[in-house]
Image: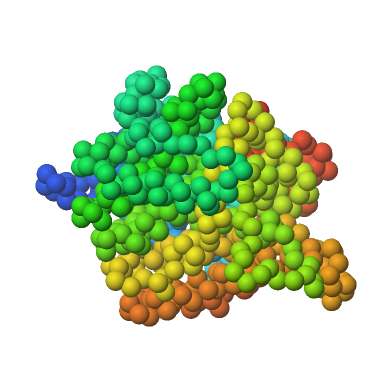
Amino acid sequence: MSKSFPLRFGDQGQYELSKASFGHIVAGETTIRPVVTPTGKDQETVLSGGLHTYAGWKKFLALHPKVVHLMEFRLGIHDAWWFARELQNGCITLKIPRRLFTKGAARITKQPDNYYKSGYLWKTLFPVTFTEDDIIDVIDEALKNLDRELSDSITAEKPDGVLYGYARMTDPLKAMLIRVQMRGNQIMSAFPAWDQPWTGNNGKAYSHVHSISFLLAESTVDFADFQPEYGPVFQGDRFDREALLTSTPQFIKSRRNRSLATPVDARNAARSQTLKAVAIRATPMDLDAIDRYLADYPCAKDPFAVQRGMYMNLIDELDRWPELFNAAQFTENVGECLYVLSACDNIFNTRRAVDAAIRFLGQALIHTGGLNTLMFKALIGDMITMAIGHADKTALRDVLAALAASPCRAALYTEFDLIPFYPFRKAGEPEPPEGQENPKLQFNVDHLLEFIAFNLGENYLIAFSKEQRLSFARDTLGHGNQWRLARDLMSKFAERDFDFFMPDVLDLDDLTDQVPPTEQDLLAIVRDYGRMMIMLRQRVVLEDPAAYKAKLEDLEKGTDAYDALYRQKNRRDYVLAMHQLMLAKAMKYADKEGYAKLKAACAEALVRIPKEHVPLPRYVPDYIATYRKDEWAQMMFVLDGDDAADSPATGMDDDEDDSGG
């Protein structure tokens, strides 16, 4: 790079970038921290600020050989994991483990997260292809295209502030928003903002789901470079079906598939009796074999990808070979094995099920597309239920500690509101006879399509009708045997699988003799889940904004129009009520356990939530000279929703969020 520092930017050269500040951007600033290891005292290099290039990250990462990508991370073998995703405009969002930050550097990322500006412990990086000259050019362009509403007014009295500007504006798919941190006329740092511009459907504002989700897709940086498989089922690049059948417990291989004419709840009740009988007969040697099965890659690390791969490549064999078909249902198999282990833990005074659940929560991968999210929601919910009733009274504390930091926790916190699927009882229609339950929902692919269409993101809810979003959702299942996979998996769900996490699955009022979860873990869980509920409530409104402006009294009671409006309004009120109930119960539990911080956080949230909302995607302002809004509006939309399937056929880019720090 031939340019000499300091560099001057802006229409009048009023902003100055020093060599030190540019080094802060490109390579970051580090410090040496003493650490204590099992072998004695040592020291390690940690990040104290900056670092907004992928090359800089890889150089820093080389100093920490036991910190690996989430795809390769194994609990108990590696120290920590990192994760990076590439946005459609080339910018990268990078999640860095807390242990690699100084305390101050980590704290700096916390405040923007509180105010929906960027994610805690996330960094945003310039595109991999950018040279140092490219970074300088983008900063220069951004400072000539400032967003007046977002940018601070930098004055002598208030010299510290943040400027936001736009760059690469001639290409809507490459346009980016740059955050420039100023002290007087000095540029202290510059990096892509979290909320990239909405130039089509490719920009998203900050959303908490993005900061706690680590969905795998082709947009995962260096996706093809990692080789995470391990264990007997994967020998190098080869999948060994015989090894899978050998390791799969017999009670799974011999499982009879449910006839679709049999209600899923009846099937599950009968299956539970079978599993109880298995547990009664199980020997310690049998349980050791189940332990090994659950620790292997298809169960402990990436059950969805292995099952999807078998459906894509071995569907004829799955149809001919019932044992292989049963062996391929990995998420269901994990749940059944945990059921057996939990029952045996009570017999043998062990905690095999607890340890297996903690391992899964600590390392399991989740893929974009929606189906994996629903599978993990049901499975992790069962893990919480297991821990609540476990004979080891520390089980719930330990499982919730694993959940609080789990890379797949967002699946449990993602709610699938079933209200739209229940038949509406007309005014005057008689109540069902006392003691007679309403028919239970039997799930199919249509329910999945509704879930995907709703969760494509705020920009899709704003820009597209429900029919269009359902069409996008159908497209995500239109390749290979993805539809068959979805059909088989959806048919296994019961209504209870989609109970709200809190207070349905975890009701703090019901905890009696369990060792209490730590206050820090409950704070993290309540905060994460609460912010997901805020996002859910906002999406319900965005799905049909007119419904929340309309008045019920303007319609005739009992008509289809009245019923539809009542149902839509009730959805939003129901989510709000569940959120408030969760906080009230958490505050009551905090009071009982003496958790002052948790009690205060819940009390503050109860006051704040009726008006709290997630930022919406922002258009580029019309006054930006290089912004060709009319031309861009005619660009073809490319499906890129967070819950779109990972399919080259759909041109999918799963999350287009980014971060700061």
Task: Judge by depth and name the residue closer to the eye, 636 or 245.
Answer: 245
Task: Judge by depth and name the residue closer to the eye, 615 or 393.
Answer: 393
Q: Position of residue 256 (x, y in %)?
A: 47, 36
In the image, is 558 to the left or to the right of 41?
right
The residue located at (34%, 35%) in the rendering is 249
Instruction: Give above or below for 142 relative to 518.
Output: above
Q: Position of residue 286 (x, y in %)?
A: 25, 38
Instruction: Give above or below for 43 relative to 597.
Output: above
Task: Judge by depth and name the residue closer to the eye, 118 or 300.
Answer: 300
Q: Position of residue 567 (x, y in %)?
A: 73, 65
Occupied quadrant, residue 425 = bottom right
The residue located at (78%, 37%) in the rendering is 635
Q: Is residue 559 visible?
A: yes
In the image, is 555 to the left or to the right of 91?
right
Toward the left, the furthest residue is 40
Q: Is residue 131 visible?
A: no
Task: Judge by depth and name the residue closer to the eye, 519 or 386.
Answer: 386
The residue located at (76%, 59%) in the rendering is 544
Q: Position of residue 582 (x, y in %)?
A: 50, 71
Instruction: Give above or below for 182 relative to 570.
Output: above
Occupied quadrant, residue 247 = top left
